[in-house]
Image (tube, rainbow, N blue to C red):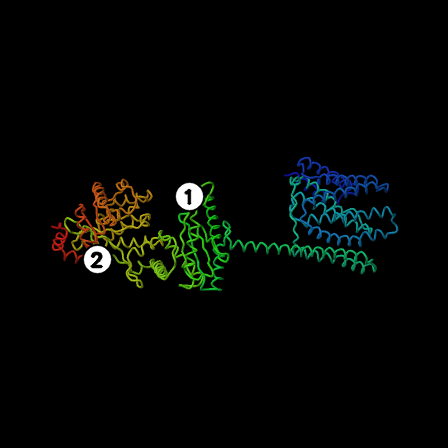
């Protein structure tokens, strides 16, 4: 059990048998507790070494009061109390000194001082009417005795004020201070009751003494508590007042008047001046308190207004560049369109490959580049125009009083030239470029959202076409944007609504003129846009996350079609293209196995085509291809020659076919021949794609290609037409093909 709690329980235990003792024994017990209190405080000071001197004054005050108790017991029989009173009052002074230190170290400002002063004034007026005035009016008392008797309630008033200072300010309070304040409160309660009873001549030793005993006990417990050594910093001034405290002040302000009325009714005559003075003092204090609250509220309102203004500025201002942000730009654009809807232009720009700067030179350098670009943009526009940073490396310019596309395009060119000037950062010249999208109001749409969207669409076109870094939004771009939006919205439902179809183009063996495989080519029969080729929607489906679902349908449909051919006696393989998202999908091998099993097709009749970009994919993707090849599915590299892959890495892939992109057919024949020899040396079947003319076909045959694919051999056909096409051509088609492939004489 901690010493402070043991001491406190001991003091409570003493109070129980106190009333059963004789008066002499009570005096001895009382004196014993009084003497033990300063000893306990001294022990706590020695043990915990407090950070300030208040506890030394507590020990001194308790010691002086204990000495006064002993002096009173010794001299009471002779009727001499001067020494005891001197010691008592000296103890009050020491205790008040300690409370002053506590109050100063824990005060939160003038508000708590005024509140304590109001309550103290009320207490002083009550004590004056009940104790001090009757004592001074008692003619039987000698002047010195009356002065000493008056000194006690006056000291109590001072202690009440200091105690209220501590209690009203709860900031920084700790257990030791709480115990000390409780001890002072208990001591004051007994003091006040004793003063009233003494004036009336009704005091006897008994329960009144409990407060004094508990005061000494609580002071000792406070000093023995470890928190007595904690030095709490002064709290910040706070002039706020709670509704509960305001109600308490109002009630206390009425107490002197109620006491005066009560005394008037009891005794018939009461001096009104003390109540008037107390009321006046409290009135002044309340006015001062409320004026402080009003000033504080004004300060809070001003501070809140300032903060709101700062927040509003931050909400429309970019912290890094100081430019207007996206929200502020949108508001200014809407305002400009409202005042002059036909003469507004928006320029959206995006720095090219800015990520490279961040990754290579670091984000601090990237921030310097962004700030420099912002400064250059601001320096090359008119004062009435607005430059904004929309986010990341995206900027926008609002051009007002714009007479048409020409001034906007001229400004974009001027800004582009300014941006491309080298930026010196830490001794390094950093070069950046940008792409611009320009939209002028009145062309298609004139509201803020439409104009921003139009500029974004033009910016997207500019970034896609590197030879044109500045693009102007026009009707064609509008139609394209609407078309892309429709495709993006509808592609997710294409499979479910049965709008996807497959057409098949044969891969022809140039020796036999017979088809060795059919490539499945996807088409979308859109109800509004008509037939869409893969180039029109597959990239959108890929970015929108729908390609895995579409690819799963294509694989299943192609396997079912190949199985149907075999049921008719045509053992021909089917080629299916795989998108990058399908290759990254871990369920791809399972989907293929399920499709083959459902169609009843052997794995080697299915050939999966992947672009040479698969060489740069992660290891797990390449392992997935190994798993498919091990299951018997054929693999083919499509559009070979369009990338920058190492030829040595092609041999690392488990492929059996190499399809050469048509771009090589239009280029250098030596390069085409070298690629053919490379594929043949790896044991791969090399297929020439995009053969569209007889001259190209003759060249392919002359170079020694084993197979070819293209419009000159056959256009893509629906699945229902393939059996008829194979049956109709038969030997006749083979003979015609041989004649077509025969060398010219």
Q: Which mark is residue 487?
A: none
Nearer to me, 448 or 513: 448
The x and y percentages for residue 377 are 47, 52
- Measured in 3D between alpha carbons, the distance from the residue under mark 2 to the one under mark 1, in whole angstroms, is 49 Å
Task: Quadrant for residue 81, please give it.
Answer: top right
Q: Is residue 424 left or right of residue 8?
A: left
Viewer-side residue, 216 vs 545: 545
Q: Is residue 505 left or right of residue 372?
A: left
Could you tell me which secondary element the residue under label 2 belongs to?
strand
Q: Position of residue 311 (x, y in %)?
A: 55, 54
Q: Quadrant of the N terminus?
A: top right
Mark 2 neighbour density, 10 Å: few (under 14) some (14–19) many (20 or more): some
Q: Indicate the secondary structure of the residue bearing disc 1.
A: helix
Residue 544 percent across, percent down from the top left: 36, 54
Query: Which residue shows up at 17% across the image and 48% down it?
Result: 701
Q: Which is more toward the observer, 679 or 344?
A: 344
* Residue tagged 2: 717
- Relative placement, left or right, of 30 versus 580 is right
Q: Which residue is mark 1?
A: 359
Which of label 2 and label 1 is nearer to you?
1
Q: Earlier in the sequence, mark 2 or mark 1?
A: 1
Toward the viewer: 362 or 221?
362
Name of the residue lying farthest toward the top = 46
The 10 Å Cα crowd at callout 1, few under 14, some 14 to 19, many 20 or more, is few
**Contact flag, marks 2 and 1 (Cβ < 8 Å):** no
Residue 189: horizontal and vertical position, in percent?
Answer: 74, 49
Give the number of marks.
2
Q: Residue at x 74, y 56 (%)?
A: 284
């Amino acid at each position: 059990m901690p010493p402070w709690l043991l001491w406190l329980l001991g003091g409570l235990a003493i109070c129980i048998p106190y009333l059963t003792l004789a008066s002499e024994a009570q005096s001895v017990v009382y004196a014993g507790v009084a003497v033990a209190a300063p000893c306990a405080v001294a022990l706590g000071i020695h043990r915990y070494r407090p950070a300030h001197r208040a506890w030394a004054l507590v020990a001194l005050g308790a010691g002086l009061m204990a000495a006064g108790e002993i002096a009173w017991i010794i001299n009471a029989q002779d009727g001499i109390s001067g020494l005891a009173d001197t010691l008592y009052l000296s103890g009050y002074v020491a205790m008040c000194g300690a409370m002053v230190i506590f109050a100063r170290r824990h005060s939160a400002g003038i508000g708590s001082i005024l509140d304590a002063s109001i309550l103290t004034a009320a207490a002083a007026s009550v004590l004056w009417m009940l104790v001090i005035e009757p004592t001074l009016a008692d003619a039987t008392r000698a002047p010195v005795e009356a002065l000493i008797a008056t000194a006690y309630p006056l000291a109590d008033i001072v202690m009440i004020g200091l105690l209220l200072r501590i209690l009203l300010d709860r900031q920084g309070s700790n257990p030791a201070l709480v115990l000390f304040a409780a001890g002072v409160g208990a001591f004051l309660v007994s003091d006040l009751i004793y003063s009233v009873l003494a004036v009336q001549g009704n005091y006897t030793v008994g329960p009144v003494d409990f407060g004094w005993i508990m005061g000494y006990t609580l002071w000792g417990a406070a000093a023995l508590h470890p928190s007595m050594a904690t030095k709490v910093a002064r709290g910040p001034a706070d002039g706020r007042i709670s509704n509960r405290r305001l109600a308490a002040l109002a009630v206390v302000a009425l107490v002197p008047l109620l006491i005066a009325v009560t005394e008037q009714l009891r005794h018939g005559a009461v001096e009104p001046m003390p109540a008037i003075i107390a009321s006046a003092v409290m009135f002044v204090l309340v006015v001062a308190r409320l004026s402080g609250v009003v000033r504080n509220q004004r300060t809070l309102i001003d501070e809140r207004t300032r903060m709101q203004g700062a927040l509003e500025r931050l909400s429309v201002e970019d912290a890094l560049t100081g430019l207007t942000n996206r929200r502020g730009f949108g508001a200014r654009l809407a305002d400009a369109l409202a005042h002059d809807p036909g003469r507004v232009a928006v320029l959206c720009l995006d720095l090219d490959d800015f990520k490279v700067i961040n990754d290579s030179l670091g984000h601090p350098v990237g921030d310097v580049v962004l700030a420099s670009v912002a400064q250059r943009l601001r320096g090359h526009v008119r004062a009435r125009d607005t430059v904004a940073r929309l986010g990341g490396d995206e900027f926008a310019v609002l051009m007002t009083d714009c007479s048409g596309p020409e001034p906007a395009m001229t400004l974009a060119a001027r800004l582009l030239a300014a941006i491309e000037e080298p930026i010196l950062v830490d001794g390094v010249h950093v070069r950046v470029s940008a792409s611009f999208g320009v939209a002028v109001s009145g062309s298609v749409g004139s509201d803020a959202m439409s104009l921003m969207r139009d500029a974004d669409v033009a910016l997207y076109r500019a970034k896609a076409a590197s030879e044109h870094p500045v693009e102007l939004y026009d009707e064609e771009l509008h139609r394209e944007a609407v078309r892309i939006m429709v495709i993006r919205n509808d592609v997710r439902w294409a499979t479910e609504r049965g709008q996807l179809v497959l057409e098949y183009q044969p891969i022809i063996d140039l020796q036999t003129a017979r088809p060795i495989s059919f490539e499945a080519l996807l088409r979308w029969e859109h109800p509004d846009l008509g037939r869409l080729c893969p180039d029109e929607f597959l990239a959108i489906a890929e970015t929108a996350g729908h390609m895995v679902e579409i690819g799963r349908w294509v694989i299943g449909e192609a396997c079912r079609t190949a199985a149907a051919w075999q049921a008719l006696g045509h053992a021909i393989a089917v080629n299916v293209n795989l998108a990058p998202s399908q290759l990254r999908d871990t369920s791809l091998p399972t989907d293929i196995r399920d499709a083959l099993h459902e169609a009843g097709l052997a794995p080697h009749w299915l050939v999966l085509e992947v672009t040479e970009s698969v060489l740069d994919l992660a290891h797990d993707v390449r392992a997935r291809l190994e798993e498919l090849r091990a299951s018997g599915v054929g693999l083919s590299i499509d559009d070979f020659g369009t990338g920058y892959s190492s030829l040595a890495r092609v041999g690392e892939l488990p492929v059996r076919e190499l399809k050469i992109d048509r771009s090589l057919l239009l280029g250098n024949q030596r390069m085409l021949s070298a690629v053919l020899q490379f594929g043949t040396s790896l044991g791969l079947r090399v297929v020439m794609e995009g053969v569209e003319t007889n001259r190209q076909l003759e060249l392919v045959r002359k170079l020694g290609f084993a197979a070819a694919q293209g419009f000159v051999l056959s256009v893509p056909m629906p699945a229902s037409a393939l059996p008829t096409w194979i049956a109709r051509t038969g030997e006749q088609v083979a003979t015609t093909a041989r004649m077509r492939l025969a060398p010219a004489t």
